[in-house]
Amino acid sequence: MRAFVVKEYKGPLQEVDVPEPVVGERDVLVQVQAAGLNVLDEKIRAGEFKQILPYKLPQILGNDVAGTVIGVGAKVRGFVPGDEVYARPGQERIGTFAERIAVAETDLALKPVSITVEEAASLPLVALTAWQALVERGKVQPGQRVLIHGGAGGVGTVAIQLAKHLGATVATTVSADDADFVRGLGADSVIDYRNQDFEQLLDGYDLVLDSLGGENLEKSLRVLRPGGKAIGIAGPPDAAFARELGTNSVLRLVMTALSSGIRRKARRLGVRYEFLFMRASGDQLRQISALVDSGAVRPVVGRVFDFDQTVQAVQSLDKGGIRGKAVITRA
């Protein structure tokens, strides 16, 4: 089986022959037809997450998949060969830049019927991130105000639509070229991050979804109402995340220290900060499928690469400039 692997951190992505996936009794074997590209893929290759996601190298990259079921484990009851499915495999079982992948049944869902396989492959990681930030953590209610940074990106394009579906008033930061595009997704207020300072324009927000970290995150705390919450997906990680991972006491202390500054600033302002590293969930993907098929959320695919262009596709992640997601296709 052909796949794209990283053999050493910071090393090149290489196409190689790998063994066929091992299918456990509760696993589903999927023929990969398309795989979404995520900044996380490049960060894993570069070793930026090796302390918290210690993959055993060589590692097949790829965190999103859409394809067809070609086999099921003995105890699988929810899927049969021929089903069209999509998933973000569990973080310990990534590897969608391959011809086939075994995915835990609990991480898998039938793909939305109204979209293409490439569009389905663009969704799992970013849609689950948006869902877990806005629904699970943020508990967004009608009438609340939500700021979503990077509204033209993978997470942002889904988060804007989901927040509007939940009844929120949505502000977002983008370049001027993307202003009309994000308004079309439902954004009520659009800030040109190159020429405008969102901190000077916004105030009293209930929730901020921050994908940049650093100074942008600090400024985001100051646009929240008292009791508001900033959810960061770019870091810094916090102690709650360390507990979720089940890390050792040393790493828990390190993560606590990394986020101590931003948590202290949040407390002084009477607001909260939480780090989010999304998790796989077939149940949540089924709810997302329903939203897609109802028209409440539509995927945005900015570019499609062929499977044999996977190396160039991953390299393109650093360049940015793609609305929504880029996808690799084997169709």
Image (tube, rainbow, N blue to C red):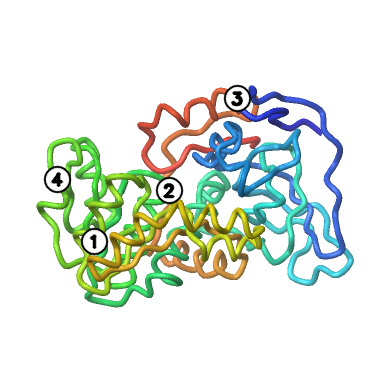
Label 3 neighbour load within 10 Å: few <14, some 14-19, many 20+: some
Spatial CA distance of label 4 from label 3 is 36 Å
- Point out residue 71 in the picture as x, y percentages from the top left corner: 83, 55
Q: Nearer the viewer, residue 25 or 218?
A: 218
Q: Amino acid at mark 4?
A: Asp
At mark 4, the secondary structure is: loop
What is the spatial separation of the Cα atoms under label 2 and label 1, in whole angstroms? 20 Å
The residue carrying mark 4 is 197
First in sequence: mark 1 vs mark 4: 1
Disc 2 is placed on an element classified as: loop
Label whose residue precedes the other's in the sequence (3 or 2): 2
Residue position marked by numbered label 2 in the rendering: 234
Q: Residue at x 32, y 57 (%)?
A: 160
50 left or right, relative to 80 = left
Q: Say which element carries label 1.
A: strand
Residue found farthest to the left: 200
Q: Secondary structure at mark 3?
A: helix
Q: Nearer the viewer, mark 1 or mark 4?
A: 4
* Distance from Cα at disc 4 to Cα at disc 2: 20 Å
Task: Decide which of 241, 176 is in the foreground and name it.
Answer: 241
Tell me which numbered mark, 1 or 3, is placed earlier along the sequence. 1
Instruction: Of the two numbered discs 2 and 1 on the same chain, state the one appearing first in sequence.
Output: 1
Foreground pick, 21 / 110 = 21
Residue 224 numbered tag: none
The front one of 69 and 74 is 74
**For the residue marked with disc 2, what is the amino acid?**
Ala
Q: Report if the CB atoms under discs 4 and 2 are less than 8 Å apart.
A: no
Neighbour tally class for label 1: few under 14, some 14-19, many 20 plus, Cα within 10 Å: many
What label sits on residue 170 in the rendered view?
1
Circles 4 and 3, Cβ within 8 Å, touching? The answer is: no
Amino acid type shown at disc 1:
Val
